[in-house]
Amino acid sequence: MSKVVKFGGSSLADAKQFRKVADIIRADSERCYVVPSAPGKRFKDDTKVTDLLYRCYEMVVSGEDFAKAFAPIRERYDGIIADLGLSLSLEDEYVKIGTEFRNGTNRDYAASRGEYLNGIILADYLGYEFVDAARGIFFDRDGKFDADVTNACLGAILDRTPRAVIPGFYGAMPDGSIKTFSRGGSDFTGSVVAKAANASLYENWTDVSGFLVADPRIVKDPKGIEVITYSELRELSYMGAGVLHEDAIFPVRSANIPINIKNTNAPEDKGTLIVPSAENIPSKYVITGIAGKKDFSAISIEKDRMNTSKGFMRRLLQVLENHEIFPEHIPTGIDTVSVVVNSKELDGQREKLSERIRETVRPDHFEIIDGLALIAVVGRGMKSVKGIATRVFAALSHADINIRMIDQGSSELNIIVAINEADFEKAIQVIYDMFILSEQ
Ligand code: ASP
C-alpha cells in the first residue's frame, strides 16, 4: 500500500524545511509519492516563489530582460541546492525557461515553474524519480480538468514508478501547453495523485496541525478537530474555514481515500483526519466546527397568499438567474421569502434587479437588507441529539444577538444563522463557549 504526501510552500521554503520533509518521508516507507508546492514564505514579509514568477512574467512581457527578472527566483533555488549540499545544477532548466519566456510563453507556464523546479530538487534530494505533471495530469480542450484521462495515464505511470515526486499545481492542455489550477492547487494535485496511485492515505502536510473548531483569529486557542467527514468539511470550507483547497476533496472522496492534514513543524501532532464516513467514530463534541462569512444580503419579499400563487418561486429564481445571482439560502414563510445572496453579486445591478422583481412577482413588500453575516454550526453528532438548535439560539440570545434568519440543512448536518455583521465575532465566540467550553 502506498501513501501520497503533499507538502505546502511553507514546508519547502528553505533547506531547513526540506530536511524536515525528507525526515518525514523517510520515517514511513509507504510514503511513496510526493507532491511539492513551490517554495513559500520563509518569514512574514517574504514573497512566495509563485508570486515572484508572476511578477517575473509581467516584467518580461513589459520588456524587461529575462535574466534580470528571473534572478531572485534563481537565487532561491540555487540557495536551497547549495544549503542541502547537492551536486545538482538547474542551469539547463533555467536556459529552457528563458527560451520559453523569450518566445512569448503563457502566464500559467511561468507560474508552474515554481513547483516544477522544486520537484526536481526534492526528487534529487530524496533519490526518488521526478515525474513532470505535464506527462500525467491533463485538461480538456475547454481547459477543464480531465479526470478520466488523467487517472488512466497517471495511474499507468505510477504503476511502473514505485517512488516519485510529482510537482503540484499544473498539468498539460491537449496541445501540450501548460495550465495551472487555481491558487493553492497543489492540494488538488495531491488528491489526483492519491486517486491514480490507489493510495491508502493522502497526507497533506502544512504549517498547522489540522482544522480547528473555530477561527483562531476570533476564538483564543480553539480545540483542534481530530476526525471530520468529507461532508462536514464541505460545509465548513464553503463557509470560509481554510487550510485545504476547495476542490481537493473530490478526487479522493470518490475513491474513498482518507486525507490526513499534518503539520511539518510538529509531525508528532495527530492533525485532522478527513474520512468518507464516521459512523463508528464518535465525535468528541456534538458539534464538529463553527465557520462563517460576512458580506451577505437578503432579498426579502412579502406577498399575501404567496404559498398559493402558482409559479411564484420559479419566477423569482428566474429573475435572479438572469442576473447571474446565486442564492445561498432561501428561507420561506407562508407569505414571505428571503433569498440570501453574496452582497458582491448585487454590485451594479441593484436597481435593475429590484425593478425586475417588482414587475415579475409583484410583491406587497420588497427590500434588500445588507450587512449580514452567516454562521454555520456543523456536526455529524447533531443528527440524533435533541436541543442543538435551542442551545445555538440560547447562546446568541443570551449575548443579545438578534437572529435574522435560520436554516437547517436537510441532512441535519448543520444549522445556519444569519446575524448582523457587527455581531459576527461575538456570535462565533458564544457558540464556541456553549458547545465546547461547557462540555469539557
Ligand atoms: N504555488 C501555488 C500557489 O502559491 C500552488 C500551491 O501552492 O498549491 O498558489
Image (spheres, rainbow, N blue to C red):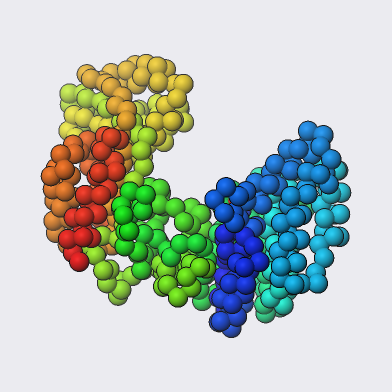
Relative depth, front residue between 93 and 227: 93
In the displayed structure image, the side of residue 277 where residue 6 appears, left or right = right
Relative depth, front residue between 58 and 232: 58
Report whether residue 211 is seen: yes
In the displayed structure image, the side of residue 316 where residue 138 appears, left or right = right
State the image coordinates of residue 295 (x, y, percent, origin top left): 37, 34
Give residue 344's quadrant in the image.
top left
State the image coordinates of residue 66 (x, y, percent, origin top left): 83, 44
Q: Residue at x 42, y 17 (%)?
A: 352
In the picture shown, does residue 358 fall above or below 151?
above
In the displayed structure image, the side of residue 267 where residue 55 appears, left or right = right
Report whether residue 310 is seen: no
Locate the N terminus and report the quarter of the image it occupies. bottom right
In the picture shown, does residue 82 fall above or below 327?
below
Q: Residue at x 33, y 48 (%)?
A: 218
Q: Residue at x 25, y 31 (%)?
A: 337
State the image coordinates of residue 50 (x, y, percent, origin top left): 65, 50
Q: Residue at x 62, y 48 (%)?
A: 47
In the picture shown, does residue 301 fall above or below 220?
above
Locate the C terminus and report the quarter of the image it occupies. bottom left
